[in-house]
Image (tube, helix red, strand yellow):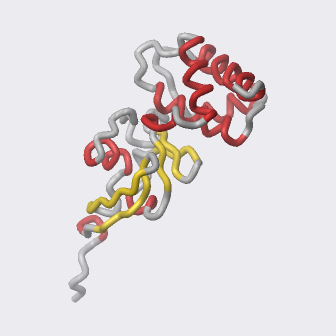
Amino acid sequence: MSTRLPNKWRIILTNFTVNGKAVSLTAEPDMPLLWALREDLQLTGTKFGCGMALCGACTVHVDGQPVRSCTTPLSAVTGKKVVTIEAVGGTRAGKAVQMAWLERDVPQCGYCQSGQIMSACALLAQNKAPSDADITGAMAGNLCRCGTYNQIHAAVKDASVALSKGA
C-alpha cells in the first residue's frame, strides 16, 4: 500500500514572479492561480467570473501570454512570470490600452474590464497593427454583460493607432 498522498492533498512550494516581484507560496498544486493572486497576494483586480475559463474576467499574462487564471493550476506557473491588471499599465501597450479605454468610456459596470484589458494588451504586445478580425479573435473569449463590445473594439483599434504613432 502506497503512503503517498493524492495530488489534491499534497502541499507544494511554488516560486514564480508576479508583477516583477519574486513570490513563494505553499499551497495545493491544483489551487487555481486566481485564488493565489486574490487571496494570498491580495491582488484583487483579477476577477472571478465563471470558474470555467469561459468568460475571461480572470485573464492574466503568464510569460506574456493571456491565460485564464481560474483554471490555471498554481503548479503550472512555477518559474514563470505572471502579470496582472495591477501592473499592466507599466507597459507601453498597457498605457495605450488604458488611455483608449478612458477616452472611449468603455467600462459600464467594470467587472469584466481587467480581463478585457489584459487580452487587449496581449494582442497589442504581439501585433501593434491588428486587423478588425485580429481584434475580434483576440477578444472573443472575453464576455461583457453590459454589451460594450463596440466600444471595446474601438478602444483596441485606438490603442493600436497610438502605438503606431509612438505614443
The residue lying at 57 percent from left, 35 percent from top is 119
Quarter of the figure that contains the C terminus:
top right
Residue 140 in view, yes or no:
no
Task: Indicate the quadrant where residue 95 lies.
Answer: top right
Front residue of this view, candidates 127 and 8: 127
Residue 126 percent location from the top left of the image: 70, 42
Residue 93 percent location from the top left of the image: 63, 33
The residue lying at 43 percent from left, 38 percent from top is 58
- Judged from this view, the residue extending furthest toward the front is 166
The residue lying at 77 percent from left, 24 percent from top is 165
Please state if 87 lies on the left or on the right of 160 as rendered.
left
Front residue of this view, candidates 129 and 111: 129
Where is 82 relative to 97, above or below? below
Residue 75 percent location from the top left of the image: 40, 62
Residue 30 in view, yes or no:
yes
The residue lying at 59 percent from left, 11 percent from top is 104
Task: Indicate the quadrant where residue 111 lies.
Answer: top left
For the image shown, how many numbered marks are present on the structure? 0
Task: Indicate the quadrant where residue 137 lies.
Answer: top right
Where is 135 relative to 76, above or below? above
Quarter of the figure that contains the N terminus:
bottom left
Residue 130 percent location from the top left of the image: 76, 31
Where is 152 relative to 133, above or below? above
Please state if 127 lies on the left or on the right of 57 as rendered.
right
